[in-house]
Amino acid sequence: MKSFLLAWLLFKRDWRAGEMRILLFAVVTAVTCLSSIGLFTDRVSRAIETQTAALFGGDLVVESDQPIKPAWREHAQKLQLRDSVTLSFLSMVEANGQFQLAAIKAVDQHYPLIGEFRRPSRDSVWLSPRLVSGLAIKNNTKIKVGVASFTAAPFIQVEPDATNEWSLFAPRLMMSLADVEKTKIIQPGSRLNYRWALTGSSAHLEELRAFLLAESPGLRILSAAKDQPTLSNILTRSSDYFQLASLVSIALTAVACAIAIRRYTERHYRYVALLRTFGMEQPDILRVYLWNVLGFGLMAAIIGGILGLAGQWLLDHVFKNLISIPLPAISFWPIGYAVILVLITLMGVGLPHLLRLKNVPTLHILRARVLPAERATAYWYLVTLLMLLLIGYFTVQNLTVLGYFVASVLCVVALLLVAGWLMLAGLQRVRSQLNSAWRFGLANVHRYRTNSLVLLVGFGFCIMVLLLMLHLQNGLLQDWRQSLPVGTPNYFVVNIPAESVKELENFLAAKQVKTAGFYPVVRGRLTTLNGKPFKEAIPESARADESLQRSLNLTWRGTLPEKNTLLAGQWWNQKEWGLPVVSVEHRFAERLHLKMHDVIGVTVNDQIVTAKIVNIRDVNWVSFRPTFYMIYPPKILQNFPATYLTSFYLSKQQNILLTDLVQKFPSVSVIDVADITSRLQSLMNNVTQAIFFILGFVFIASISVLMAGVQANITDRMQASMILRALGASQKQLTIIMLNEFMLIGAIAGLIAAIGAAITSIYISSHVFELADRSVWQLFLLGPLVGVVVVTGTGLLASRKILRQNAAEILRTFEG
């Protein structure tokens, strides 16, 4: 109890002296940024997942040509999953004496699971603009579907779960699932597509997936994150970026706490020596300071958490117009997580300093000296580092991201220490040859060597993470802009007879429509792998893959298609066009555990075509160009009957060309993906906004660490300033001296940070985000510039009190 009371008195004394306020500012700012980043990334991640699931139709989707079994739905209800069933099929519809092929979707009362959409009521149907135009429909017009008549209700502007199904081949008609029976359209042998969408907790969804695969091994079960490359690309990359931002916030918080607690303990050496002079025992001293640090840590964490929540309130109410993506409700786990992290960091980094405090000798009052570290200090730091790594892994749950980040941080710290030692060694030689302002500035760097190294490492780390996040952000945004640029194809034409290819190509060229090229398509099923039945040759976990349940689109090509990149092997030359080889897409290969030189057998028109894998490709699935899992050389498949497909972009003014195209080429099918491309662009825009906000939070957190670093040796600067002021130095001269000191540290820190950010960015870009190689030379120009500007600006801002005071005022500060 006495220890607690003394700790409280000590806290009040430090607060009145301003000591605790400086420490509190550093830690509270770091915790605020940590909780803000945690809260924002958590909300944005959930919002993006929701938007992605809405575009896909649900978190999990089961597709079948048979009705969904009641037992399956009962099992889903037991797992507390929400579900909805839709039925899709093609049928002719009639209105005003005109007939039109329509893609009919019948929805139940729970549709859609995610988002808002007014469902068609009984005895009414909703129509897409294409169908409205084709049949000259107006509101309340009667439209006949099968043998039943319905009233045309409001038009469909946006379909919540528009996917690659019937709606792409024909205009949409939406009706109630309960009305399908009276149309008498469904007959034995009808081609139907039942779609069972589900949403709920990830654990329950995975449990249902396992149950369904056990019940029906060949069932097609899809999810946006795994089975839709276009959506998966956006979701995975944005998630990785948010995870990296969380790691950065953890590291910045740890650095801020380490700098702050180091300054705090060093400032109390003489006070502890005085306590020991009065007879206080070492264990009592340790308990007093443990109580003090714990209480301080809790207060800082709570204040930081409240400020983090206030930041979310500002996002929701003040800056809501800047964020178009609707953010879900706040989850409070990032606040608790921030509190735990701060306490672990303060105790982990601070305990070795507190243990050193209890060993302060009484003679320290008369003669200050550097105290030796405890024997267990290195082990304690190692334990703290391991705990921080565990927290980091719990946060990101991605060993690749965590490994690259930790390795880069360790390398940069090592480089900064080496550069700092070289800088200190070189200062002695050049200092005497410089003018007074530079000489005094460099003297401060050399005089306070330990503090200068701490500043160099802290500043270098902050600048590195800023450059890294900025470079990765630019890479992601550039890649997304390139994947969906203006003019991205929004229409596909399929089932083009071989004899019509040239004529269609000329037709489109005459209308000034640029295509993505014409690709032959041959249908085939995977049959064998290395001489064995395909399913027997792959692991059991891959046997339910959807590509094994259907025929695949195969093509041949003499050159590597645009938006395809080779990851392994070489593309064939013209002399090799007759060789039995094949190129496979890398995600397809990973799912089926295929590797280079495997021999794949595909059944085409009752013939087995075998080919060896000679290269593996990466495909940009967001490009909306014809893409294929498997591509053969021209002479392997060209003797099989084939149709062709192509894609192109049409503006709204050019849409009238579709009518001419269908009339002139009645055998082809036109697939409209304009709605999908526009919604994907909207999703990318929302992710881009979120990334900009995350970068802003990281910048604020970095500045807080820089401020803590400068404040850490504010006492030494005040002493040096007092001496110079007493010797007649003006405020301008003191400003120039500090300016030179911070510019030197900032330039060196920025250069080393640029090296670390460049190396880390190269590896993370290629191995985590799968981005194309990007130039990093700009970082070597930006790093020193950012270092000089940010470090100098932050240093002068944190030292402004020193620059304004005269010698007498500074002396009174020490006396207080």
Image: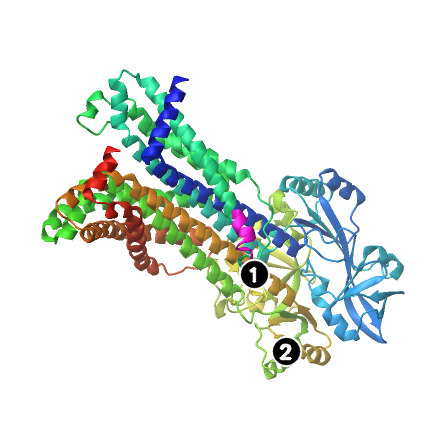
Q: What predominant SS class does the magenta segment belong to?
A: helix
* Numbered circles on residues, count: 2
Give percent across and percent down for residue 616: 51, 57
Q: Residues within 10 Å of mark 1 (few under 14, many from 20)?
A: some
Q: Would you place residue 210 above or below residue 676 in this image?
A: above
- At mark 2, the secondary structure is helix
Front residue (pair 344, 293):
293
Give percent across and percent down for residue 517: 57, 73
**545 with respect to 481 (left or right):** right
Front residue (pair 281, 183):
281
Image quarter where the C terminus lies is top left
Q: Would you place residue 293 above or below residue 663 in this image?
A: above
Q: Residues within 10 Å of mark 2 (few under 14, many from 20)?
A: few
Question: Which mark's residue is nearer the viewer, 2 or 1?
Answer: 2
Image quarter where the N terminus lies is top left
Mark 2 or 1 closer to N-term?
1
Front residue (pair 446, 123):
446
Residue linked to disc 2: 653
Q: Check disc 1 and give the amino acid type.
A: Trp
In the picture, residue 186 is in which quadrant?
bottom right
Q: Check disc 2 and give the amino acid type.
A: Gln
Front residue (pair 84, 792):
792
**188 with respect to 421 (left or right):** right
* Highlighted magenta segment, given as a residue range: 312-321
Give percent across and percent down for residue 756: 33, 50
Spatial CA span between label 2 and label 1? 27 Å
Residue 814 in magenta stretch: no
**304 with respect to 628 (left or right):** left
Query: Residue 621: which numbered mark, if any?
Result: 1
- At mark 1, the secondary structure is helix
